[in-house]
Amino acid sequence: MLSRSSTADFRRAAGRLALGLGLLLAPSCTDRFEEINTDPTKAANATPDQLFARALKYGALYDNDFQVGEHLHANMWVQFFANAKPEFNTDRYESNDTWSSTFWASFYAGFGMDLQQAIRLLQPDPTQVNRLSQARIWRAFLFQRITDYWGDVPYTEAFAGAGANVQPAYDRQEAIYHDLMGELTAAEAALDDTQAENFGPADLLYANPRAANPAPDAVTSNRRWRHFANSLRLRLAMRLSAVAPALAEQQVRAALASGVMSSTAESAVMRNTGEGIRITQNPLAVVLLFKDSRVSATLVSYLRRLHDPRLAVYVAPVSDANPSLAGLPNGLSATELTLPQYNPSNFSLAGARFSNPAHDQNLLTYAEVCFLRAEACLRGWDATGTAEQWYTTGVREALQQAGINAPAAQDEYLRQPGVQFELGRALELIITQKWLSLFGHNGFEAYAEYRRTGFPVLQPISNLGETTGQVPLRLRYPLSERLFNSVSYLQAVSHQGPDLLTTPVWWDK
């Protein structure tokens, strides 16, 4: 069944994580409004460091937000996983308002609000420019994920706060993208190595002692945040390759000139300790415990066809008695999922590393940057190296992420038909390898890139859902928005198009 945490559990988990990390992750002021008067850790007492740390950890997604936000939508729609429960419907290309609404609310009334409060507290003090810049960069990361899911969303008027505008207007996605790229440019430029103030242990990505690759000093931390900002800007720019190619090229060139990630150590990785409480654990590992899904037959087919050494890493044996690696088809109906041939016990879970609660979460990696640069070279937007060189480096980096470290094994894989670089089908190769590299870590990005490019080639589903079998192009807005923010909702629909799974977002051309 779906993971559900009570408010008390939520707060206890945050407190325990605080002890483990050496800092307090303050509970959100919006988790339960009625508790603010009795909660001694209410937002009025929270420091920017506490708010930022919480926005980082919960923005990387807690298990329930991960399940209803990423796993049951993006991970299914890009065919990383397939649903195994008859009552779960999103894998059949049907809407589920409860799930999408929960994810929307978790951002707008939870960790997104926490981050905005940290920004408000930091803005008046010029000595806090590094903290402020890093918070702005993380805000851009979170907002891209939200607008890529829904399209037009509240942005300029979001997080107005209690007593202010609780019916924010929806900004057009085009305007959001323009502003996000401007924010990343300004925040990256504002990072100041002469200022000693930074988040220190509250920076769970780069400066916390328990980060995946902790920065040894503030200057290194700033450099990694700069390269994270520019790499994120590169990701944003490439999203516009079809809808606004001139702007995309300009932003790609500017991001590369300012400096993107150049090594694995600079990857944005959320470290998980795997301790007894779920907030310290990899959310996919927690969700896999429910056994509500299996790896997709599409994923297994690609791995087999490419003789991919990650097959045994990504896919677990069906059981101790059945060592086969078997993927479950996507889009099975509720009736089909009750048939013996589709019994979940006949299909594989994800590999052991993904069931490990201490497995880290890759949010934006050097491997992804290599694939972005390969495509940029293909389009003539990156003069450093060639598309083949960046593609090859990206594949090697992605294999290393999966523990395939032997150069000989990497060389053999790169010679495989369907992997070996061919200029005539370079975009398909680049995006397919990016898709494979994102498995188990970033369904959001894989789903966005599929919509942008049409790759990889996914299997059609036989149960047509709300889309006549087409992979959904966005999420529908929460019912609560239609009921309680109807003016803004209707304005967004009149501009973007019907509030359906088949309406493309702005950049999806």
Image (cartoon, grey):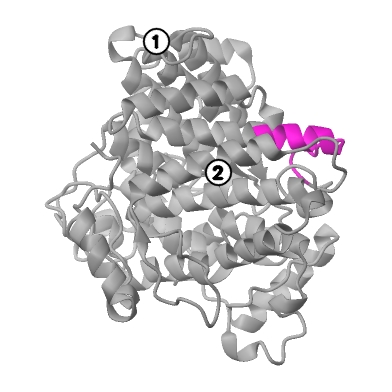
Checking the image for residue 421, the label placed there is 1
Image quarter where the N terminus lies is: bottom left
Vertical order, 446 against 201 (above or below)? above
Give residue 311's position: percent from left, percent from top: 47, 32
**Spatial separation of the CA atoms under disc 1 and disc 2:** 36 Å
The residue closer to the viewer here, 152 or 322, is 152
Is-magenta flag for residue 147?
A: no
Q: Name the residue under label 2.
A: 183
Question: Residue at position x 74%, y 53% from top?
Answer: 273
Q: What element carries label 2?
A: helix
Hey, which quadrant is residue 6 in on the image? bottom right
Q: What residue type is labelled 2?
A: Glu
Give residue 483's position: percent from left, percent from top: 29, 80
Hey, which quadrant is residue 436 in on the image? top left
Residue numbers of the magenta segment:
211-226
Q: What residue type is labelled 1?
A: Phe
> Residue extending furthest left?
468
Give residue 332's position: percent from left, percent from top: 23, 56
Structural crowding at the residue carrying mark 1, measured as other residues with C-alpha within 10 Å and reported as few (<14), some (14–19) or many (≥20): many
